[in-house]
Image (spheres, helix red, strand yellow):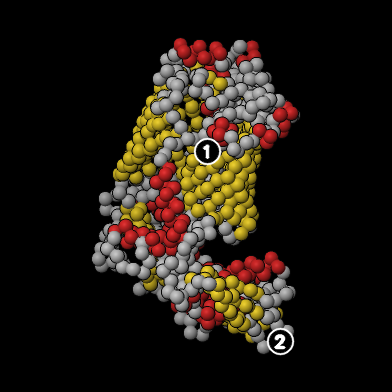
Amino acid sequence: MRHRPSKEKMMKKKGVAMKTNRQPILAGLLIVAMAACNPTKYLAEDEKLYNGGNVIIHKDSIPKERKEAFEDHLETMLTPKPNKKFLGMRIKLGLWNMGGGPDSTNSAVKNWLKKRGEEPVLLEDVNREYNENLLRNRMENLGFFHAYVTSDTIIDGKFAEVNYNAFPGNIYRIAKVDFEVDSSSSLGRDILSTKDSTLLKIGSNYNLDVILNERDRIDNDLKNKGYYYFSPDNILVEVDSTKGNDKVDMYVTVKPETAEKARSPQKIGNIFIYPNYTQTSEGFRTTRPRASQLFRDNYYIIDPANTYRKPVLANHIFFHRGDTYNRTDHNMTISHLVNLNAFKFVKNNFVDNPDSANTMDVYYYLTPMQRKSIRFEVLGKTASVYNGTEANVSWTLRNAFRGFETLNLSVFGGYETQTGGNVNLNSSYIRYGAEVGIVWPRLLSPYKWAPSRRFIPKTYAKVGYEFLNRRNAYTLNSLTMNYGYNWKENEQKQHDLAVAEIIYVQPRNISDDYRAQMDTVPTLRHIVDPQFSFGPNYSYTFTNTMESARTHTFFVKTGLNTSGNVLGLIQGANYKDDNIKKLFGTAYAQFVKAEADFRHYMKLSSTSQLASRVMIGTSYSYGNSRSLPYLKQYFSGGPNGLRAFRARAVGPGTTIPENIGENNFFADQTGDFKLELNTEYRAQISGMFHWAAFIDAGNVWLQRRDENKPGGRLTKDFYKELAVGAGLGLRVDLDFLVVRTDLATPLRVPYRAPGDRWVFKYIDIRDGDWRRNNLVFNLAIGYPF
């Protein structure tokens, strides 16, 4: 139960509570734990359970941190791996033991347990000599040419582990790099033209991985100059380590046995496109079609039914007849065809042209997706005393107008009802609606501009309607319309420009009870104000989080949202003089809103990282608006923000949340400005299980003073009004999704007295009332940031 704060009591708040019969679950976990605690149950007298291998590097000149990282790297190469552990227990081995271990059985339960468990990994399964050679070869490949490894077995009762003593010796460095190729040939000249970009740097350590990467680099450069048949295996890097002083000379050359065809650039001949191809048992045909017309003097498009408009399809083929082959155009064409969202399979063949030397004909075999599809989803929701369900039916039509357009129509409906506690005004609702949208894989604009050839730009248009009926309070009719563009500048940068976004919300059937509550709590009035905003939006996203080798990666998203600015200035709108202008009978919003989301990820190890986020939201409402419309305002709290506070229950500023009714319904606390800071340590426990420790801080504020929300206006002392919470989380990473649970508690409550906002002294983990009212449980899908 929530109460207004006092000097004696903290803010009390409810998390998500779910009633379950825990005894069978706990009993099952206890049995598995007991079995895991006796992992040697079925071992013979002379058998030892393998605990793993340890690599100890004996070289004082290597710094401690690098030595530890090198040891960890070498340990990943050891085989076999010991039985997996979770929280120090071999759970899978425990399941195998519960299934009877090596004993055969007809019991379905025991067989089920054994299939989900794993057999014990024994010391006798370890081939020490093989591992010694593996470690030695790896060190030699890293430049330690005189490395050697010894090993010892350590036995402790029924357990054993192996220590590998690695003696790397001195590392060899590159003294000279020569490209010994025939400069009189086109191949030799093209290789020499790329040598300034070589990865083989004088003074660097010898490294086999770098040598392999250098061969790939040369091959990639040659592919972009027409050498389709060339391969990294045609490059030979000879290493001379006889010069002494731990130095090596390197000589890059082309193998003599390289085929003549691989030494010559290839031209593009005829280009054949089969956009309605169905593969047969005979495979892909490569014969030329007898009756096909050359389109744009470049393409034979075999599409008798005219399923696709030829100009649109041709725009996504980057080869032209007579071009020199290059890998960039090759990959861009494949990428475009795959991302048109029209083809299930995309196959590409190059065949030597029978009439011209060093010329290849190109064949594209495109197998269409099913043109029409329908998807049905049902979602069940449960939280505390609230339960509900929602259904969504989505119908998709691909290639709607023969230009690879995707038309989507979705219809949804759902309800939520209160199944416990006292009924309040917002306890139940019914919502339903529909949305129709279309996406064109190109820019439909009166101005010709192409942001990037590598990625497909898109134009989108959407219209949606939603009806919300809060049975005892009000109904809302919402209409949204969007038209805009999104495009990628490169792999890291993405833009989204909504040329026009229109949002129209009209309240209806406001109940007498709700009107009475509005008189008591004016905040409720803002929720049912008519809302009408229109204008362009723009967002920019940058991320390099896909570059997993980096220690520091970033995600940045900025956005600008406007409404009614030009029209408001033309009409001279001014709410201060009660000169509020209307459009279609409704007052429109006039504002400029800007926001930014900065995220930083620091890799601490292969299984842990520190993730941080700063969110800043600003706005300026003027003319026709005193503040942002409700749907555009900022809020804080919830599973993806301040996890120690309920969503929309923080702020603005030091405003005390309004407590309505016996069931503690809070009016949504929103604002015109927002600041949020988050830091989270994430680490792997074992396998799919991860944990996190986090701290969140933030609040929202108003642009102007509001007598109904004292302390809500943004001032220079905003930093003294931040709410702070902290907690722990458990995450289950299933690869295709992450299930996240977080348990948090408030550490600083902004609407308490200035000297009493930090609430550490009130924390009493042993007190049931404190736990119930201050520990907030969040269940969500995906990471919060």
Disc marking residue 244? 2
In-image side of 422 versus 216 (left or right): left
Q: Amino acid at mark 2?
A: Gly
**Quadrant where the C terminus is found in the figure:** top right
**Visible residue check, residue 358:** no
Q: Secondary structure at mark 1?
A: strand
Q: Secondary structure at mark 2?
A: loop
Quadrant of res 510: top left
Please tell me how crowded label 2 is: few (under 14), some (14-19), or many (20+) other residues with Cα within 10 Å: few
Q: Which residue is pictured at 54% across the width and 23% down the height?
A: 667
Tally of marks: 2
Q: Which residue is pictured at 55% across the width and 55% down the height?
A: 684
Q: Residue furthest bottom?
A: 242
Q: Distance of mark 2 from mark 1, alpha carbons?
A: 65 Å
Disc marking residue 777? 1
Q: Earlier in the sequence, mark 2 or mark 1?
A: 2
44 vs 544: above or below: below
Q: Residue furthest left?
A: 281
Quadrant of res 44: bottom left
**Visible residue check, residue 56:** yes
**Quadrant where the N terminus is found in the figure:** top right
Q: Which residue is pictured at 62% across the width and 17% down the height?
A: 708
Residue 91 image position (x, y, % from top left): 45, 59
